[in-house]
Amino acid sequence: MHSSTMVTMFGIAAVVAAIGVLFLSGPNESEEPKTPADFGRRLFRVQGCSSCHAIGGGISRGPDLAAVIPRLRARLADSEYRKHLSILKKSREDIYALFTTEYDNVLKAQGDARIRVWFAQHLNNPRFDHYLGQMPSFAHLTPQQVGYLTAFIFTLQ
């Protein structure tokens, strides 16, 4: 195959991919985001979160994020989370020792603030509370971007 043919094929593939993104992104994705949740929705797509996480069905490598906030409320409830950390401390002292500060920060927060703190820690280093998980770190995100993603996640009640 000639190099010009290869370049043409790659060009066509890029155009087809761009058209696919436009169709898959929906009608409102071309609009400028207006709210923190809108910015978060866009970040969710741009950062590749949607390549692993479905929202309300479909196949995904990571957990489906539909109704994730009620699940996190239950998981991070004071007694449940302290029980989880107690088990972790006994079974994996090495992991617990690595993230003691992060666990303390989560425990200091109450209510939905605890979810926000946990989510920020989780984006920075998902291993802090899922040491066998496969999610990559998003430590490159700014605090503002983490806030936007958090606002979006809170729409998934």
Image: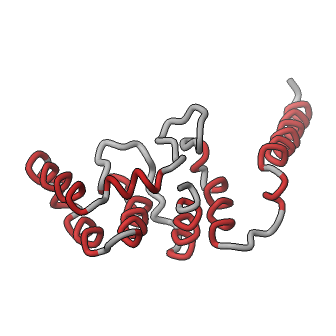
In the displayed structure, 148 sits above or below 17; it is below
118, 51: nearer the viewer: 118
Residue 152 falls in image quadrant: bottom right
Rendered residue at 62%/64% (across/down): 40
Rendered residue at 54%/47% (across/down): 66
9, 68: nearer the viewer: 68
Q: Is residue 19 left or right of residue 155?
A: right
Residue 156 falls in image quadrant: bottom right
Which residue in the rendered view is the most extreme toward the left? 90
In the displayed structure, 114 sits above or below 157; it is below
User: Residue 94's x, y, as percent?
Assistant: 14, 53
Q: Is residue 59 left or right of residue 10?
A: left
Residue 16 falls in image quadrant: top right
Q: In which quarter of the image is the N terminus?
A: top right
Which residue in the rendered view is the most extreme toward the top? 1
Rendered residue at 59%/44% (across/down): 55
